[in-house]
Image (cartoon, grey):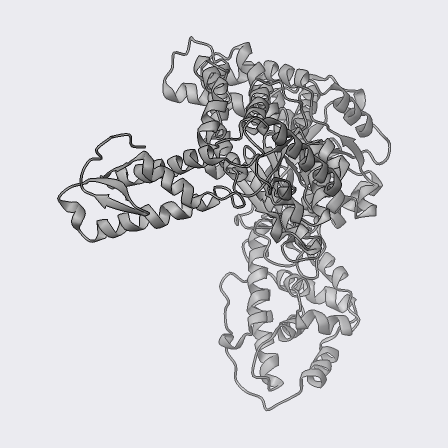
Amino acid sequence: MIYFKGFGEIANRGCNEAIALAQELGHLYIGTEHLLGGILREGTSRAAGALAEQGLTLSGYRDFLARRVGKGIPTRLSPHDFTVGSMRALEKAVLKTRWLGEVNTRAEHILTALFTTNQCTAAAFAAQLGVNLQAVCQSCEMSFLPGPMAGLSPRSPSGGTVRASGKGLERYGRDLTRLAAEGRIDPCFGREQETQRLLEILCRRQKNNPCLVGDAGVGKTAIVEGLALRIAAGEVPPELRRRRLISLDLTGLIAGTKYRGDFEERFKGVLEEVAVDGNCILFIDELHSIIGAGAAEGAIDAASILKPSLARGQLRLIGATTMEEYHKFIEKDGALDRRFGMIRVEEPSRETALAILTGLRDRYENFHHVKIGDAALSAAVELSVRYLPAKRLPDKALDLVDEAAACMRVSGQNPSRPMGRREVAAVLARATGIPVGELNREQQTAMAGLEQRLARRVVGQRAAVNALSAAIRRSRAGLAEDGRPTGSFLFLGPTGVGKTELCRALAAEVFGDEKALLRYDMSEYMEKQSVARLIGAPPGYVGYEEGGQLTRAVRERPYSVVVFDEIEKAHPDIYNILLQILEEGCLTENGGRRVSFTSAVVILTGNLGASCFSGGMLGFGSREKECEERRQAVLAEAKRNFRQELLGRLDEILVFQPLGPEEMRQIAGLQVERLCRRAAKQKIDLAVGPEVVEHLARLGGSPTAGARGIRRIVERKLENPLSEYILSGKIKRCRKLCAVLQGDDILLEQRQPAAKAAV
């Protein structure tokens, strides 16, 4: 007789009988069907009795096995001939033994493992012979309960039934009422209405299962913890006194469940504990996760296990989820949805959020060992609302207070000095990348001089520069209208007059980096199907979960200049997107997520009406009058081509005027100045005389193309000769160069210019 380590005497005999049965039938393997026959041949176990109660006899099963599998020449087999399925079933039986706290594996463990293993041949054969598998398993499980080791803690951390130990709630739950009594839960403020509604649903006779639905960060879990505090203090109706509020860890329930039926057994055991206890209220955060949880092949998920208990009123369950997940998962399952009473949890007002922060102030002070002033709390609410539109109160304000206090403690600042607005603003500035602190004297000077700094880069467009600067100042001073972009403009005019350059200058001066410019060329969005690239693909299409190019970029960098270049080339559906951005300050992706544009400057550029500038000026005295006439002509052209509701939502329509010779010279000077700075990085002192700059402006400037050709002329006439000069090695002896004009050619010489009126 072969002995299997860890198996009891009867189980050992059953395994040996399985080997003998396979040898007698001439089979070259030992499968699960032979293990079932071995239990029948051994005949003395509770498992064999359960099979006999179902009418399954050894002779009948042996004949069935010979017909189904066939009969060969008797052969000799060893334990090495067990199939993978047989070994898996035996391993499952051993694990079950350990889960139950027993010493030796019994035949009942083996039979239960056979009948609960997915795609098991033995279970399929038994079912074909009329055996009720569930009844046999229940009969075997009755023998587990009175065992000598029953009730001990499982020795394997990877799974097991909780019904044997009665410790399911302790292992997979967190007693919130006990934590509340110990003072380890933060109090809840400003949620009296939601808490009252929660109590009303819990006290119902049927369907007493509330579900808190709201955006992430509004305080759904805090409301449940507030209920635990009220239960611990006895401030609840008599029906709910002495109740235990248990937060169930669904992940812990699933962890380690290797085989089909393990999760169901474990979860059912927890629910039975709740029903037997009678004083438990379960809380499942992220309630939508019960849909599909633990559903292996051929198994049922947690939601299906919960439904009968919820319908019979055997347990009270509180759930919490977001509105998006509620619609996506819970609402689709009508049987589950009707068992819950939905409680909408809205984002609190600024006043309520400030009250919440004030109530929690001592908790953060005790933890960080710093003092938090009233100004810091007010600033956290105010600045988070203005600059963190994608998040929700009170969570985003608490994050600012928490991190600011942590920064004070880490930096070793004087703990007696209370934390103020400056510390909160510094944390927010690091998170957003823009200065959001109080407008000190230096920042006020910078805002006052914004026009001058922009005008240094954008020549000849004073009206556009002034309008943009005024909009930025309104926003920085906090006077801009809530719910709309910082500024929205339409730039019209001929090509090459500085429309895109002004956008770049604005991104660099206000948002600190030209990378804050998000430019979208509308010539790429002329087709109807290309519109989806901005906001994301529709459901069912590739890329649906990824979001759109525009919404993803603004979500990652909300403080930016968003430019829709050459808007007149866009498909008409683009205008519908712009209407939503300009009016509501947000855009909804195809996935349902809302992206805020309230911190962005939205600029539309176009060459519409460029024909109005084709004629030359009549003279110096008529310049202002003619500019105004051309401006009115361009505006009339815009009204004919753009929808009135789009134009009405813009802050201002700015018409860029053509550039004259003087503006061309200034732009050429700017291009040359940039080249000189780049040369200085190579330790080359490049001097360019004013006659060279004027010559470049004359060659590159054009009434039709504007200043767009000046950069190419500078590259051709200056950059190319300079690069050849450097690579030739002539620059080694003298690193001072002068660009001089000889006829129509520009020469580089290693000497200083005679009249140093260089740019």
- Taking depth in this image into account, of 294 and 710 the one nearest to the observer is 710
Residue 610, above or below 442: below
Q: What percent of the width, then of the height, locates residue 615?
A: 60, 41
Q: Farthest residue in the top direction?
A: 416
Residue 294 in view of the camera: no
Q: Farthest residue in the bottom direction?
A: 73
Q: What percent of the width, then of the height, locates residue 464?
A: 57, 29
- Taking depth in this image into account, of 161 and 463 the one nearest to the observer is 463
Left or right relative to 698: residue 460: right
Circle count: 0
Please give the name of the residue rendered at 69% of the width and 18% of the height, measured from the top-left corner: 190
Position of the C terminus by quadrant: top left
- Taking depth in this image into account, of 183 and 679 the one nearest to the observer is 679
Q: Locate residue 48: give its quadrant.
A: bottom right
Please give the name of the residue rendered at 64% of the width and 58% of the height, measured from the top-left corner: 542
Residue 225, above or below 89: above
Q: What percent of the width, then of the height, locates residue 611?
A: 63, 44
Q: What percent of the width, then of the height, locates residue 564?
A: 61, 42
Residue 441 in view of the camera: yes
Q: Farthest residue in the right direction?
A: 205
- Taking depth in this image into account, of 633 and 734 the one nearest to the observer is 633
